[in-house]
Image: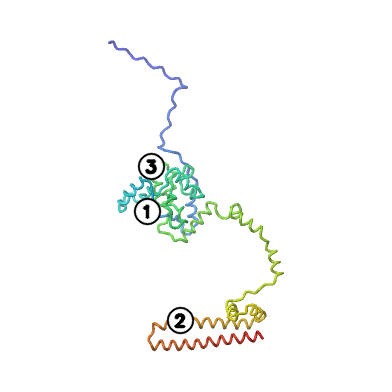
Amino acid sequence: MPYRRPKKRASRSPSRSRKPLPPRQGFVSHPYTVPRTNAFLEAAKLTPRGCIPTRQIPFEELEEYVRRGAPPHLRERAAQLAARQGISFGKPSRNWELEYPTKGTERHELRNPNIGCGDECFLAPEQEGFPMCAKLQLKPRNPANRCLPEREGMQAAYNRARQTRHQDVADVAAEMLQRTCPDRMSAAEVQTFLRALKKVKGETRSSGSRRFKRERARRSRSPSRSIKRERSASSPRVKRESGASYRIKRESGSSSRSRNLFDGHGQTNAQLAQIGHDITRTDAKILALLGMAPRLTANDAKAIYNDVSNLRADRQALVDRRTRILEQLGD
């Protein structure tokens, strides 16, 4: 068969020609929006230690969560991780496979401020990407620590951001890893950090908050201070009595008469209060000696009982003196 030269294809028109591709700058799987400031980093600057406390979940609690009813794939993965707990390779982010919130409902709940923690648990909150807090199903012993980030989550976010060429996310994750506290913080320090976090998020008490509005409405319904001052001035003020005076009234059995007797008798009231104090101190000494007596020898216990009898005599003398002063006031 004779050779035939193939026909030359007609060139495309300029309008239909393909546009040249831009130079490849790097692989980016999905565009993420990273906030300009990170709430955890800003809150750490307001605390005395200047670091971010992290939540640490023991592997025993993860195994308990898996036994309670985790998905089947997590059960298989938990068995594999249990066998690798003593291996150092992959330890910084190993248990994050059982803790991280999956895409969908778990991340929606975590970002919801009413039932979850808010945007601060994500490095890309608009797309719910790169979570750092554990799922809400893993409840901590202290509910206040539920929204603390985990070091495993920060490490996993840093690794995934480097793999997908999200350098801005990787920079924030690396800075958070450097600012985490090296040791375990006390409960008071964690509360200080959480208060600073609320201040950064703008959740402190302000004129626009719902709680402050309820408090202001309640105060508006209540009478003002000037009206209360006028009412207190018009009504007779009852003087508050001390503990010794109350005991004297209770033992004497005449509360109204005692209230009338104490008005205008400052010196006598002071004497009665001193007598009541001496009686209380004497009772404490007696109880202390009686508690020591069973552990002593016979001779020492005998001396203790003699001291107790002397103290009881002194107490009876104080009671008689108080009774005489009350009788004189009654006359």
In the rendered view, would you say 274 is above or below 85?
below
Instruction: Say which amino acid is labelled 1.
Output: Glu
Element type at mark 2 = helix
* Residue 95 in the figure: left or right of residue 287: left
Front residue of 295 and 212: 295
Identify which residue is drawn at 39% across, 84% down. 296
Measured Cα–Cα span from mark 2 to mark 1: 51 Å
Q: Earlier in the sequence, mark 2 or mark 1?
A: 1
Kindly indicate the quadrant of the structure image that contains residue 268. Answer: bottom right
Instruction: Say which amino acid is labelled 3.
Output: Gln
Q: What crowding class fits label 2: few (fewer than 14 Cα within 10 Å), some (14-19), or many (20 or more)?
A: few
**Residue position marked by numbered label 3 in the rendering:** 163
Q: How is the image coloured?
A: rainbow
In the rendered view, would you say 21 is above or below 286?
above
Q: In the image, which disc is placed on residue 288?
A: 2
Instruction: Say which amino acid is labelled 2.
Output: Ala
Q: Earlier in the sequence, mark 3 or mark 2?
A: 3
